[in-house]
Image (cartoon, rainbow, N blue to C red):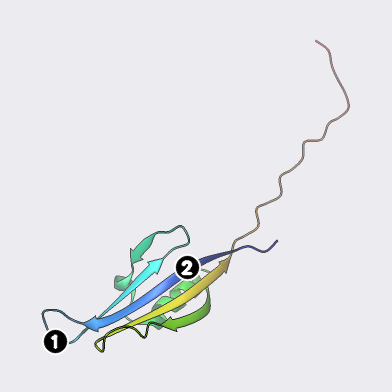
Amino acid sequence: MIRWEYALLVRRRQARANEPGWEVTFSWYGPDGSIQDISGFGDTALTHLNTAGNQGWELVSVTEDLHQSGTAELHRYHMKRLIPAAAPRQRVRSTGVYRRR
């Protein structure tokens, strides 16, 4: 049976609070429920998507939150990757020989 795990890459772009210009942040929502700020690993969505692709993640869909105010953007990149099948357990075979002590 094929099994998948899912993750989410979120890109936020918003106006800086104390100075002019924009601030872009990236967060990774892992399949284990963890959340990481990965902004320091790259400054574009393509950088992060290529990194995820190199780790076996496949882009499933992209959504944009249209309910953000005029000075903010929110993009979600939905990812999945195949969970490797566990190696089958070896059965212990009986030799059919019973020894009494």
Which mark identifies residue 29? Answer: none
Residue annotated with mark 1: 20
- Mark 2 belongs to which amino acid? Ala
Nearer to us in this view, 92 or 83: 83
Dot 1 falls on a residue whose secondary structure is loop
Task: Decide which of tag 1 and tag 2 comes sooner along the chain.
Answer: 2
Task: Please give left or right for residue 9 compared with residue 15 in the image.
Answer: right
Residue 65, how many percent across, how many down? 38, 82
Mark 2 Cα-neighbour bin, 10 Å: few <14, some 14–19, many ≥20 = many
Residue at the (71%, 49%) spot, across then down? 88
Locate the C terminus and report the quarter of the image it occupies: top right
- Residue 96 versus residue 47 in the image, above or below: above
The outermost residue toward the top is 101
Q: Quadrant of residue 63?
A: bottom left
The outermost residue toward the left is 18
Residue 79, how many percent across, how many down? 50, 73
Residue at the (41%, 66%) spot, across then down? 29
Dot 2 falls on a residue whose secondary structure is strand
The outermost residue toward the front is 67
Question: Could you tell me how far apart the alpha carbons at marks 1 and 2 are, in whole angstroms?
Answer: 33 Å
